[in-house]
Amino acid sequence: MSQSATKKTKTKTTPYDVAEHLRTPEEMAAYLDAWFEEAPDDATGIARALGDIARAKGMTQVAKDAGLSRESLYRALSADGNPSFATILKVAKALGVKLHAAAA
């Protein structure tokens, strides 16, 4: 066996970050809508989805537009966060997305 045949190459991987793929308001709205469709009872997941969208738009600007500090926005939309509905509404407005209701 040649030396090159026994040499193992390591594949370098990087964590997937959905925020890097949310480029347009339509993609952001579709992503949030998918969470509402697929996991309507997962409040933590939906808050995380809002966080993903906020990171895609820029947390500093979203926090400013929502009237929140950057730290409180991160905290509210983290996996351990429990944002108030008022905060969700402020963030949605700052993100430029609308929440819709439909008959179940």
Image (cartoon, helix red, strand yellow):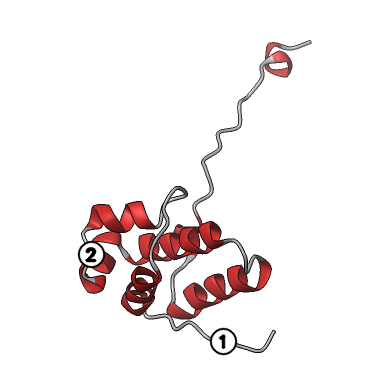
Residue at horizontal 25 percent and vertical 65 percent from the top? 63
Quarter of the rendering occupied by the C terminus: bottom right
Q: Name the residue under label 1.
A: 101
Distance of label 1 from label 2 (alpha carbons): 26 Å
Residue kind at label 2, given as amino acid type: Leu
Image location of residue 72, percent across then percent down: 27, 55
Q: Nearer the viewer, residue 54 or 87?
A: 87
Quarter of the rendering occupied by the N terminus: top right
Q: Earlier in the sequence, mark 1 or mark 2?
A: 2
Image location of residue 6, percent across then percent down: 72, 14
Residue at horizontal 64 percent and vertical 65 percent from the top? 39
Q: Do the residues labelled 1 and 2 touch (CB within 8 Å)?
A: no
Please rate how many residues cluster around mark 1, counting C-alpha atoms within 10 Å: few if below 14, some from 14 to 19, many from 20: few
Q: Name the residue under label 2.
A: 68
Residue kind at label 1, given as amino acid type: Ala
Q: Which residue is the extreme one toward the bottom?
A: 103
Image-based side of 69 in relation to 11, left or right: left
59, above or below 2, in the image: below
